[in-house]
Image (cartoon, grey):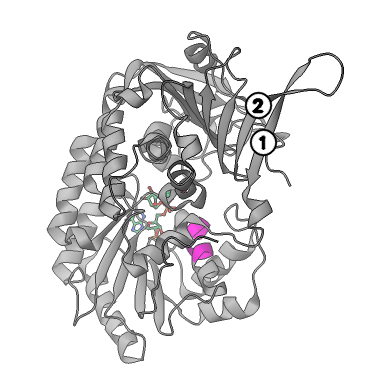
Amino acid sequence: MIVITQQNVFNVPFSFIIFGGSGDNSYQKIYPALYDIAEKKMFPENFAIIATGRRYSEEEFSAFFQHSLTSDNRHHKHSIDSDSFKFLKSHMYFFPGDNTKLSFYKDLDRYLDKLGSEGFHSNNRLFYLGLPQSIYPTVFKNVKKSGLNKSRLGGWTRIMIEKPIGYDVASARRYDKMFLDTFSEEQIFRLDHYLGKETLENILSFRFDNNIFENLLHAGYLDHIQISAPENFGIGKRGKFYEETGALKDVGQNHILQMIALATMERPRGDTDKELVRSRIDLIKNLSAKPADVVFGQYTDGEVDGKKVVGYRDEESVDPDSEVETFFAFKAHFKHDRFKNVPIYVRAGKQMTTWVTEINYVFKSHNIGDNVLTIRIQPNEGVGLKILTKKPGYAKVLEPTLMQFCYKHYFPEETFDAYEKLLQDAFAGKRTSFNTSEEVEAEWQFIDPLVKNRTPITFHKAGSWGPKEAFDLIEYDGRNWIEPYAAFCQI
Ligand SMILES: NC(=O)c1ccc[n+]([C@@H]2O[C@H](COP(=O)([O-])OP(=O)(O)OC[C@H]3O[C@@H](n4cnc5c(N)ncnc54)[C@H](OP(=O)(O)O)[C@@H]3O)[C@@H](O)[C@H]2O)c1
């Protein structure tokens, strides 16, 4: 085993304060991640988790928290061990209140001090912002007025801010100014949870620690690159959020651009966090797409996994005439020589035929698609290389076959969720897997022109692979979307 860097160490006591503790993201991702950290016994001796929100009483919150770990949560499939659960629960507190009121922050400050006096160390504070962006201005103003932004008596104060930040370049700048008016850059952890995915982090090891592949990943050998990120579920109860955001801003501006960056960026010039982030930013700044090469789609009613589902316009809190996209596809180009004339095609959407995220490097070959290097981000994570193989027999008959590495095979016990890693990083003050403001701005610079010169919305049945126009986009260039291989890493 080659150990290159040391694991995170965060054996200092801290308080973790969740703004939006009754929200969907806390339920789906934060609580399961905290539980996993507890199960691995990675919390320090003294810590406190304080969830906040308006809608629940303490009792209701307790049920909500427990349900997040025991229900059919997509992000938390494994069973829970009662000792770990009890341990975590004994460090959890609920502090009800309204994030838009100054008194809430002042009371919270006193409450944290009280916990401190009862033995929980409260001078190291990490705030998590799981709130609607629309209330950020009030939140930051009140945090500043209450003094909660300040580091206390030799401790640290940090804030994790969820993606997306802003709605375009101008608002992202405005928001950033507001963040920096309240916190210093070192205190801010801008979160895009894809950066915490083990499979995404492994792209860099795969590329830069195994030179054989890296040498093949350039214009001399590649025909094009594809990313597919369909989801076989809808918008759930997030209609209001989705109406304001749409798929391109919800996942294109952040997750997809981060995947493109890691898949195609240059080797960082050094081993520091700064250089790694620099390399990601340089790539994003060198990527461009024409508005005409973007397809916006929306699902109509249909069938997904054998179940009938309603169209987007009939979802809760959605305008019946909504033109908001739930699907997008685009073709983009790189400005640098390494991928000169190697386009990248991307498609992503809700309520589609399957749930899978993968990056495909498609090599030049007699028939395009004969040789494909696939990095499967989720599910059944792994790396596969499609090659032609002679079928046993007298005649020369070639069959496409797959060489594959599967995480489950080598590391069957080691599950490591993105939020688990990012929370641990933020507790430990490690910044590599977080965005800088420059990076967020570069992402918006790519997205803004595509939104401002938007092509008309197209429609497709729920449970399909997206609208016809998305197929036209790639087929016009004499290429095809690669259907994810169903048997990939199903071991
Ligand atoms: N859900 C996801 O899959 C996901 C994924 C990545 C990022 N995010 C980001 O995470 C953040 C939270 O998203 P979410 O999906 O968890 O949202 P959500 O389910 O609507 O939850 C919003 C939370 O904000 C609280 N809140 C406090 N003051 C509020 C106010 N004045 N108005 C409305 N809500 C208020 C709500 O609690 P009370 O109503 O109890 O006060 C609730 O806990 C957003 O920035 C989103 O972009 C979400």
Q: Are marks 1 and 2 in contact (CB under 8 Å)?
A: yes
Q: Secondary structure at mark 1?
A: strand
Residue 216 sits above or below residue 395 on the image: below
Q: Where on the image, by quarter, is ligand 1?
A: bottom left
Q: Secondary structure at mark 2?
A: strand
Nearest the viewer among 260 and 385 is 385
> Residue 406: x and y, percent?
64, 46
Residue occupied by mark 1: 403
Q: Sort mark 2 into few (<14), some (14-19) or many (20+) by Cα contacts within 10 Å.
A: some
> Residue 465: x and y, percent?
59, 24
Q: Amino acid at mark 2?
A: Ile
The magenta stretch is 27-33
> Residue 469: x and y, percent?
50, 14
Indicate yes or no: mark 2 CB to ligand 1 under 8 Å: no
Would you say residue 470 sits in the magenta stretch?
Answer: no
Which quarter shows the N terminus?
Answer: bottom right
Residue 396 sits above or below residue 250 on the image: above
Residue 470 in the figure: left or right of residue 13: right
